[in-house]
């Protein structure tokens, strides 16, 4: 495994552990799921009763991740822009993003959107 793939996987495991530790119920929103590296770790570490919503703005990446993780149950796949999330206010217990925020043109708007969908004291876990 290359160093960059190892780093991506190690960070994915870390983010999943953080989300699982803070979210024993409710839902976790993953933004910019890409190939599904974090999605796989989230589903492995979260309780089965915790809803996992994996999103990406790129339909091709969503399709790729779904195919890679087709044997995993309990993942709701949705196309979504981090800067314009299609979710209700105060609807997620945690929001997770690995290497997606650096591609968002309006980061301030993206952070406002994440705050909007998070419950009070909800967890925002991300890496760039």
Image (spheres, rainbow, N blue to C red):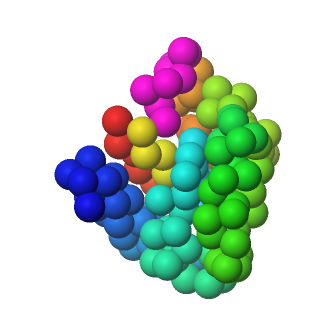
Q: Please state if 40 lies on the left or on the right of 16 as rendered.
A: right
Q: Position of residue 26 (x, y in %)?
A: 64, 70
Q: Position of residue 8 (x, y in %)?
A: 33, 52
From this viewpoint, is residue 50 visible? Answer: yes
Residue 95 is covered by the magenta coloring: no
- Where, by quadrant of the figure, is residue 80 drawn? top right
- Where, by quadrant of the figure, is residue 93 drawn? bottom right
The residue that appears at 46% across and 77% down in the rendered structure is 45
Residue range of the region highlighted in magenta in the rendering:
100-108
From this viewpoint, is residue 51 visible? Answer: no
Q: Nearer the viewer, residue 23 or 3?
A: 3
Q: Position of residue 60 (x, y in %)?
A: 71, 42
The residue that appears at 64% across and 27% down in the rendered structure is 83
Q: Please state if 55 lies on the left or on the right of 23 as rendered.
A: right
Q: Nearer the viewer, residue 12 or 94?
A: 12
- Up the image or down, 96 lies above or below 38; here it is above
Q: Position of residue 114 (x, y in %)?
A: 58, 38
Screen quadrant of the N terminus? bottom left
Q: Nearer the viewer, residue 33 or 51?
A: 33
- Where, by quadrant of the figure, is residue 10 drawn? bottom left
Q: Which residue is most to the left? A: 3
Q: Which residue is most to the top? A: 105
């Amino acid at each position: 495994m290359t160093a960059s793939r190892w780093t991506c996987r190690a960070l994915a495991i870390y983010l999943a552990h953080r989300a699982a530790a803070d979210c024993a119920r409710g839902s976790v929103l993953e933004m910019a799921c890409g190939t599904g590296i974090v999605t796989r770790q989230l589903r492995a570490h979260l309780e089965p009763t915790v809803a996992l919503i994996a999103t990406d703005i790129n339909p091709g990446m969503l399709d790729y991740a779904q195919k890679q993780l087709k044997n995993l149950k309990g993942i709701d796949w949705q196309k979504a822009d981090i800067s314009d999330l299609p979710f209700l206010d105060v609807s997620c217990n945690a929001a997770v993003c690995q290497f997606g925020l650096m591609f968002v043109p309006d980061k301030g708007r993206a952070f406002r959107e994440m705050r909007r969908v998070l419950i009070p004291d909800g967890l925002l876990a991300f890496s760039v």
